[in-house]
């Protein structure tokens, strides 16, 4: 990490005002040790449950059939999956473009788009902290934005992503779209209650944006303000569209007979499960969730083939492109640094 990014990272940990000045308030209070221990135990138990599901699925799947299913995809289905992937990434890039109005900075779109694309691709593969937040911090700092502005961009994008998630999951869970396997503790009734609660959170957010637009809130040493209702509705539109496009990729790759709303509900459950496990790219988690929830609706080999192909399109292919884009950004930075050095020598 370069010196500017390192200084920004240190300041981010200490806290910053929206305008970019470091806060002089006290450091974040650590969580209670008992809560940290409970969270770790819960995470380990969840990881163990996922591992059991994976082992069970691996033993009951004919991997020759999985390879055959992947090789048997028609070109038009793969092309449609590619188009949906491109549309999803383009829509996600819109999060940071919309954040331009929220954070009130003047960085041009041609500078924003490669930064958010690289950050999102890395976030999907190595995690939100190192990928999404870490590379946004590094690249936006190099583009001249203050730490406070970068913090507000990350905050806006994060809220955008999860408000759309809550809206979609809330509607699907409240309507009992997904039939959970027997033995799951949550059950359909519990999932319905959770869905109603999710919709309540979204409604509360919109009401707060309508009534308290511009009010400053203090969250763990950082200052944030609520966007306008118009901007909040734009957040919901972009995020719901993005999650629906992601589910569309899997739906295109799955065999016929499985309704799209059901695929969307499974993807949403799988996404939060992957986030809870803290594994890079949620490896194995999404596969386990899809096999567990769609078992009996389609052959397991075809379900796994669809999820693995989805990973190739949505994780690996964008990651390869992001590496090329990032290399280009680094080369441009070095060229600009060389030009400044030459001009300084001439002076």
Image (cartoon, helix red, strand yellow):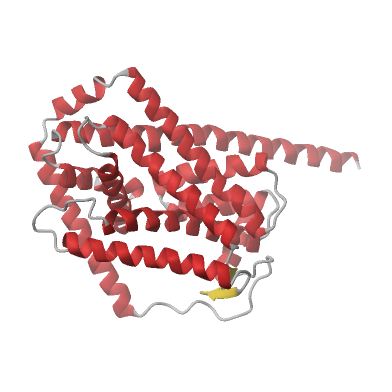
Q: Is residue 340 left or right of residue 331?
A: right
Q: Is residue 123 left or right of residue 279?
A: right
The quadrant holding residue 65 is top left
Q: Is residue 186 above or below residue 305?
A: below
Which residue corresponds to the image point at 13% horizontal and 45% vertical from the top-left? 55
Residue 272, image x and y in percent?
A: 32, 55
Q: Residue furthest front?
A: 175
Whether residue 292 is visible, yes or no, is yes
The quadrant holding residue 37 is bottom left
Residue 190, image x and y in percent?
A: 20, 65
How many dots with numbers?
Answer: 0
Residue 206, image x and y in percent?
A: 50, 65
Q: Residue furthest right?
A: 347
Which residue corresponds to the image point at 60% horizontal and 41% vertical from the top-left? 113
Q: Is residue 231 left or right of residue 256?
A: right
Of 41 and 234, the residue lying toward us: 234
Q: Is residue 293 above or below residue 334?
A: below
Which residue corresponds to the image point at 46% horizontal and 44% vertical from the top-left? 122
Whether residue 133 is visible, yes or no, is no
Q: Is residue 83 above or below residue 232?
A: above
Of 29 and 233, the residue lying toward us: 233
Of 181 and 132, the residue lying toward us: 181
Residue 116, image x and y in percent?
A: 55, 45
Q: Quadrant of the C terminus?
A: top right
């Amino acid at each position: 990490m370069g010196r500017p990014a390192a200084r920004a990272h240190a300041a981010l940990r200490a806290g910053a005002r929206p305008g970019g000045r470091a806060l002089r308030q006290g450091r974040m209070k650590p969580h209670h040790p008992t809560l940290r221990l409970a969270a770790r135990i819960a995470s380990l138990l969840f990881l163990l449950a996922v591992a059991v599901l994976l082992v069970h699925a691996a033993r009951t799947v004919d991997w020759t059939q999985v390879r055959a299913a992947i090789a048997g995809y028609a070109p038009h289905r793969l092309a449609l999956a590619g188009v949906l992937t491109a549309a999803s990434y383009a829509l996600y890039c819109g999060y940071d473009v919309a954040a331009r109005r929220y954070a009130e900075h003047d960085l041009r779109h041609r500078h924003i788009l490669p930064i958010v694309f690289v950050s999102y691709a890395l976030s999907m593969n190595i995690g939100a902290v190192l990928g999404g937040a870490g590379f946004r911090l590094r690249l936006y700092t190099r583009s001249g934005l203050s730490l406070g502005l970068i913090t507000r961009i990350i905050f806006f994008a994060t809220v955008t992503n999860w408000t759309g998630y809550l809206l979609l999951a809330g509607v699907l869970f409240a309507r009992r779209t997904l039939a959970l396997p027997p033995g799951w503790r949550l059950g359909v009734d519990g999932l319905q209650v959770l869905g109603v609660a999710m919709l309540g959170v979204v409604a509360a957010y919109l009401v707060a944006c309508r009534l308290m637009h511009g009010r400053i809130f203090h969250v763990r040493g950082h200052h944030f303000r609520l966007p306008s209702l118009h901007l909040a509705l734009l957040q919901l539109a972009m995020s719901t569209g993005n999650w629906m496009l992601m589910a569309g990729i899997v739906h295109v790759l799955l065999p016929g007979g499985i309704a799209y709303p059901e695929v969307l509900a499974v993807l949403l459950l799988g996404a939060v499960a992957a986030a809870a496990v803290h594994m890079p790219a949620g490896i194995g988690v999404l596969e386990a969730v899809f096999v567990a929830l769609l078992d009996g609706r389609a052959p397991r080999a075809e379900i796994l083939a669809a999820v693995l192909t989805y990973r190739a399109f949505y994780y690996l292919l964008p990651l390869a492109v992001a590496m090329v884009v990032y290399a280009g950004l680094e080369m441009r930075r070095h060229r600009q640094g060389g030009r400044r050095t030459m001009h300084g020598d001439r002076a």
